[in-house]
Image (spheres, rainbow, N blue to C red):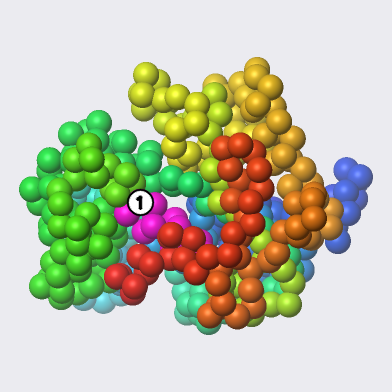
């Protein structure tokens, strides 16, 4: 994160030489990149380095973005690498003597099932030092008052679900639900009581599956569960949190268009077809040139490129969005108790305003918070 701050400072110092305007800088990111962008919105080290933000499929509120139980996890790594854990100074000194590759390889021990939890370490609070990137927990830091554009895809969790399916993980999960679900949904380190973890696992099962098992008939429920936990709830919560604390607009959309290409095809090309599910990363292929995704090769996808580029360009230039007809793209309400306002980008390429309490991705937070 501090490397990114250094890069943003370099841009401020040098952008004029490239014909740019240091007072009109937009930073954007996808997934972990979106989380990074959100962190810059609240970090005292990032003040004044940009003027707009675009976040796709990620926020600092995502469970994989912020490190919890840092001391416990660090001691676990130290034990694996033969370092003392009774004194933090000695522990750190010992860890610094270990090869970086050894520390990196030790992370696999935090992933007991199908590489979950997949992100055990990330940014956390800095207690010491003159320049603290995160001086407090993210919820307590006030975001900068600049326009923000945020988004999720319709079926964010599909790629993760497909990985588990193709790794023969469905039967394993069905047969070991209480044991594996806390790792898959990453609440093993936030719920210390083992009995409570099992109860939550059963509550989640009832909530999403009506106590049924994962099967062909309930795959969509499985995708929804992963989508809610990994992206949907946290990104929507972040949008409401930011909107409530700043005067600038926060815009939100759900990307629901599926063209000739998709990340899904990398798992199983035969299972993919136009108009099916819209998974993680599918939105970005209409904004950036991505190897293997030749979306210019057909008329419909080319139209979507024009739509998405226009949304970004309009926001970057004006800090506001207009759908282009009689209806205005309304920002997220400043009152978190109000219905959640967003725009759905549909398969028909329409931009449909929605006014929904949950966007169908907010309710999962009730279960694990």
Residue at 50% over, 69% down: 357
Image-based side of 269 in relation to 247, left or right: left
- Quarter of the figure with residue 114: top left
Above or below 303: residue 208: below
Q: Is residue 269 magenta?
A: no
Image-based side of 15 in relation to 261, left or right: right
What is the span of residues highlighted in magenta in the rendered image? 224-236
Name the secondary structure under disc 1. Answer: helix
- Quarter of the figure with residue 1: bottom right
Image-based side of 165 in relation to 309, left or right: left
Residue 317 in view, yes or no: yes
Residue at 48% over, 47% down: 154
Residue at 19% over, 45% down: 214
Residue 83 in view, yes or no: no
Q: Which residue is mark 1?
A: 224
Give the quarter of the figure containing the C terminus.
Answer: bottom left
Q: Nearer the viewer, residue 333 or 187?
A: 333
Q: Nearer the viewer, residue 221 or 245?
A: 221
């Amino acid at each position: 994160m501090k490397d990114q701050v250094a890069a943003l400072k370099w841009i401020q110092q040098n952008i004029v030489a490239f014909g740019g305007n240091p007072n009109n800088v937009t930073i954007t990111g996808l997934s972990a990149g979106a989380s990074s962008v959100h962190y810059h919105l609240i970090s005292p080290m990032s003040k004044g380095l940009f003027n707009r933000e675009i976040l796709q499929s990620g926020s600092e509120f995502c469970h994989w973005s912020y490190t919890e139980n840092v001391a416990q996890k660090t001691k676990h790594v130290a034990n694996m690498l033969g370092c003392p854990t009774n004194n933090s100074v000695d522990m750190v000194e010992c860890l610094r003597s270990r090869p970086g590759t050894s520390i990196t390889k030790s992370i696999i021990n935090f992933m007991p099932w199908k590489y979950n939890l997949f992100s055990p370490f990330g940014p956390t609070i800095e207690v010491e030092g003159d320049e603290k990137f995160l001086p407090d927990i993210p919820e307590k830091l006030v975001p900068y008052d600049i326009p923000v554009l945020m988004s999720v895809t319709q079926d964010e969790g599909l790629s993760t679900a497909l990985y588990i399916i193709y790794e023969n993980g469905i039967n394993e999960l069905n047969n070991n639900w209480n044991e594996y679900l806390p790792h898959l949904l990453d609440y093993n380190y936030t719920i210390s009581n083992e009995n409570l973890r099992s109860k939550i696992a059963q509550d989640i099962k009832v909530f999403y599956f009506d106590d049924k098992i994962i099967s062909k008939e309930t795959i969509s429920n499985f995708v929804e569960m992963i989508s809610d936990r990994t992206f949907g709830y946290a990104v929507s919560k972040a949008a409401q949190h930011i909107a409530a604390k700043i005067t600038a607009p926060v815009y939100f959309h759900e990307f629901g268009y599926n063209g000739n290409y998709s990340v899904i095809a990398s798992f199983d090309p035969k299972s993919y077809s136009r108009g099916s599910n819209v998974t993680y990363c599918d939105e970005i292929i209409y904004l950036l040139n991505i190897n293997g995704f030749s979306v210019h090769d057909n008329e419909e996808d080319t139209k979507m490129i024009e739509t998405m580029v226009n949304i970004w360009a309009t926001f970057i230039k004006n800090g506001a969005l207009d759908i282009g007809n009689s209806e205005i793209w309304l920002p997220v309400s400043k009152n978190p108790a109000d219905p959640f306002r967003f725009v759905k980008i549909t398969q028909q390429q329409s931009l449909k305003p929605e006014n929904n309490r949950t966007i169908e991705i907010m309710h999962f937070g009730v279960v694990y918070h």
